[in-house]
Amino acid sequence: MIVDCAIYRDGRRIPGPGDISDALDLCRLQDDAFVWIGLYEPTEKEFDKVTEEFGLHPLAVDDALNAHQRPKLEVYDDSLFMVLKPVGYDPDSDVVTSGEVMVFIGDSFVVTVRHGEEAPLAAVRSRLEHEPEMLQHGPTAVLYTIADAVVDHYVDVADELGTDLDELEAEVFSPARGGSRHTASRIYAFKRQVLEFRRATGPLAQPLERLADTGLLSLPVPFVHDKAQPFFRDVSDHLTRVNEAVEGLDRLVSDVLSAHLAQTSVRQNDDMRKISAWAAMAAVPTMIAGIYGMNFEHMPELTWLWSYPALIAGMAALEVLLYRLFKRRGWL
């Protein structure tokens, strides 16, 4: 459905015709005006009129309708198409959720398509309407502000993930706790959330680098103002720091998982040593008692008055000796 449709001239929202075609024609008659249409999870039928009026490419339209796209930048004859994946993070459930924002910009128009609940388009429109000096730069300003808002939120999510990973690391390496029986599953689930975050941030690097590229051999990106390149470069720098943080999180959570598994293995070995030590201590009196339990006639010291207490004392002495030996070696 269409969430908002507005005409902007010289950075300010102005009243205009409600029909999309008339609004576009009005904007193209004025150099400093453009129309911005925002849609939320539109159906094919709802999007048909927008596609027809703005001449959007069928492949880009199919991507905008079906969603589940990687972040990318596509250049077509009559428009520029960019996909971004805003993310959110719930620290209570440790779940990363993602949405999608598709942005079409062209001659005097911007079309934004939102999927999911994480897209910050309402806040972006409100921010731009309060900054007419930014909005007067037209569709380029809208594209930049959307990318800037998405990447800035990446920074917040990366910080929250880092805080939760610190808590998980402290749990694993705590001398008192050493991790619970569910720690490994929690670490693995956390790693999956980092991977989900990485799917949103990683592929976006190349589109932003293209928008920010000022090299002599680089091709200009149509429908994007040349003077906007430093701004996109700033967003690209922020994204680079986010991707470095995500790489660090991924490596660290793998190290934490390896350390936890090593600790578990060490504890299991300690338990096995203790069990083996106690079994060895139990085997000595069992063996001696088993020998004397056999009904042979010629057994040593059977007729001696103190044979029974001497045998008990001998077994006790052997038990003390074994206990001290295992204790010294750290088995008990």
Image (spheres, rainbow, N blue to C red):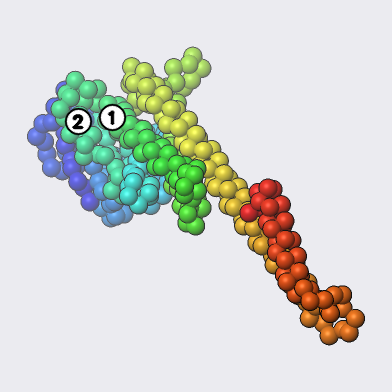
In the image, is residue 129 above or below residue 265?
A: above
Q: Residue furthest front?
A: 305
Instruction: Answer above or below: position of 143 versus 44.
Output: above
Q: Nearer the viewer, residue 134 or 294?
A: 294
Q: Quadrant of the C terminus?
A: bottom right
x and y percent of residue 37 in the render? 22, 40
Instruction: Say left or right for 281 vs 217.
Output: right
Res. 290 image quadrant: bottom right
Callout 1 touching callout 2 (CB < 8 Å): yes
Upstream in the sequence, badge 1 or badge 2?
2
Secondary structure category for the residue under label 2: helix
Three-letter amino acid code at the position of disc 1: Thr
The residue indicated by pointer 1 is: 145
Q: Position of residue 132 (x, y in %)?
A: 17, 23
Which residue is more in the foreground, 139 or 253? 253
Can you give x and y, in whole percent of width and height, for residue 281 in the image? 70, 63
Residue at image mark 2: 127
Mark 1 and mark 2: Cα distance apart in space: 9 Å
Identify the residue shown where x is 37% and y is 22%.
234
Q: Classify mark 2: residues with Cα within 10 Å, few (<14), some (14-19) or many (20+).
A: some
